[in-house]
Image (cartoon, rainbow, N blue to C red):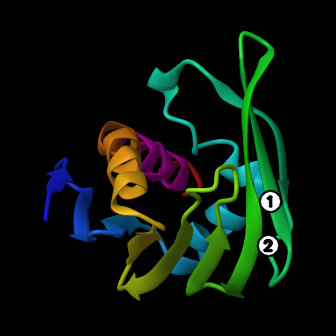
Amino acid sequence: MGTASDNRTKAERKSDCELVITRMFNGPARLVFEAWTKPELFKQWWVPKSCGFEIGTIEMDARVGGTYSLGFVKDGKPLMTFFGKYLEVTPPKRLVWTNEETEQGSVTTVTFEDKGDQTLLVMHELYPSKEARDESFEGMEGGMPETFAQLDAFLAAQG
C-alpha cells in the first residue's frame, strides 16, 4: 500500500478502500478533541492556508445523530460545502462521521489517545471504492500535513 508522510504526519493506504493518517500533537486529548468539535476552534485551523480559501460558514452539532456543515468561500464567493452526520461522539476519545457531499462519500473515524503530554491522533477514512480512496489520497497527501501543522500551532497558542 502507498504511503505519504512529512516529518510528523503519516498517511497510508491500508486497503483498497481505507486510508489512515496518524500524527502526535503536543497537548492533552481533551484539548485536541475540543479543537475538532467546537466550531469556533475548528474554523481557526482546518483549511490549509496555501489553498487560498477559507471557511465562511460552519455548523457543528457534535452529538450522535447531529450534523455538520462547512461552507468554504474564496474571495468572498461560495466555493463548496462539506456536510454529514455524526455517528459516534465519545469525548475525548473518538469521533465518527459521514461525508455526504458525493455518492462516493467516506466515513471518517478519528481517535484521540493521551500519551503523556501528547495526543496520538489516528484518522481513518473508509471509502466505498478504491477510486474514491485514491482521489482523496491525492488531495490529502499535501493538505493534511499542512492542516495538522496548523492544528499544532493552534494548540501551542492555547498554552
Q: Nearer the viewer, mark 2 or mark 1?
A: 1
Amino acid carrying mark 2 in the image: Ala
Above-or-below relation of 130 to 41? below
The question of residue 149 being in magenta is answered with yes
Looking at the rendering, the stretch of residues picked out in magenta corresponds to 146-156
- Please tell me whether mark 1 sits on a helix, a strand or a loop: strand
x then y, percent, for residue 158: 59, 55
Residue pointed to by mark 2? 62
x then y, percent, for residue 117: 38, 78
Give the CA distance from mark 2 to mark 1: 8 Å
- Please tell me whether mark 2 sits on a helix, a strand or a loop: loop
Q: Earlier in the sequence, mark 2 or mark 1?
A: 2
Above-or-below relation of 26 to 89? above
Q: Quadrant of the C terminus?
A: bottom right
Counting other residues with Cα less than 10 Å from the Cα at mark 2, is it few (<14), some (14-19), or many (20 or more)? many
CB contact under 8 Å: marks 2 and 1: yes
Residue pointed to by mark 1? 68
Counting other residues with Cα less than 10 Å from the Cα at mark 1, is it few (<14), some (14-19), or many (20 or more)? some
- The total number of labels drawn is 2
Amino acid carrying mark 1 in the image: Tyr
Q: Nearer the viewer, residue 39 or 70?
A: 70
What secondary structure do most residues of the magenta stretch adopt? helix
Q: Nearer the viewer, residue 131 or 82?
A: 131
Residue at point 74%, 75% (across, down): 86
Q: Nearer the viewer, residue 96 or 113?
A: 96
x then y, percent, for residue 119: 41, 76
Residue at point 41%, 64% (across, down): 129
Residue at point 49%, 51% (across, down): 151
Residue at point 57%, 84% (across, down): 94
Is 66 positioned to the left or the right of 28 in the image?
right
The question of residue 84 being in magenta is answered with no
x then y, percent, for residue 70: 75, 45
